[in-house]
Image (cartoon, grey):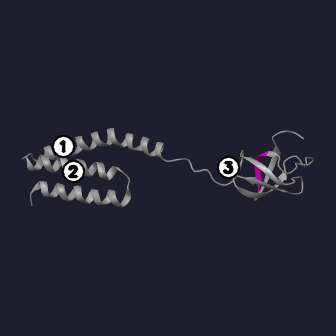
Amino acid sequence: MAAWVGWLIVAGALAVIELLTLAVVAGLLSAAAGVAAVVAALGGGLPAEVVAFGVSGAALLGLALPAAYRYQRRSAPALVSGAAAVTGRPAIVVEQVDAHGGRVKIGGEVWSARAYVSSQVIPPGAGVDVVTLDGVTALVYPKELP
């Protein structure tokens, strides 16, 4: 078997690993194995092939990998869920809110609510901010004090 065929087999195996893992590194090393296959096809000996694989692999990993990681971090939006998705959002009181209960509309959804300060009574139609969640109940504070 010719040396260049062996390098193409290595490149193909690394390409399959890249497709299965999506880790970027195997794909870059697959390209480096392709460079080594070209060197072997041009008649370079085993030392030249190994040097070509090493140099091209190091260059690809050193240049492309940091750029790929920067792109990956930049393109992935931060997922906000749970209490963090509701905390700080504005709401409108649908049913009077006091220390014992009430209802507010947050972003189109109606939530059970309680006044953050137990002595407050917030009338329907008033604007409030969600301070935090207590289970599935929003604790709210009026935007303007009554």
Give the quadrant of residue 67.
Answer: top left
Q: Nearer the viewer, residue 29 or 117?
A: 117
Classify mark 2: residues with Cα within 10 Å, few (<14), some (14-19) or many (20+): many
Label 3, on which residue? 84
Label 2, on which residue? 33
In the depicted structure, whether residue 45 falls above or below residue 113 = above
Q: Nearer the viewer, residue 48 or 91?
A: 91
Q: Earlier in the sequence, mark 2 or mark 1?
A: 2
Q: Earlier in the sequence, mark 3 or mark 2?
A: 2
The magenta stretch spans residue 36: no
Amino acid found under the numbered disc labelled 2: Ala
Amino acid found under the numbered disc labelled 1: Ala
Secondary structure mainly formed by the magenta segment: strand
Label 1, on which residue? 52
Q: Nearer the viewer, residue 92 or 85?
A: 92
User: Residue at image x 38%, y 58%?
Assistant: 21
Distance from disc 3 to disc 1, alpha carbons, whole Å, reads 51 Å
**Which residues are drawn in magenta?**
128-134
Q: In the image, 146: left or right of 36?
A: right
Q: Earlier in the sequence, mark 3 or mark 1?
A: 1
Amino acid found under the numbered disc labelled 3: Ala
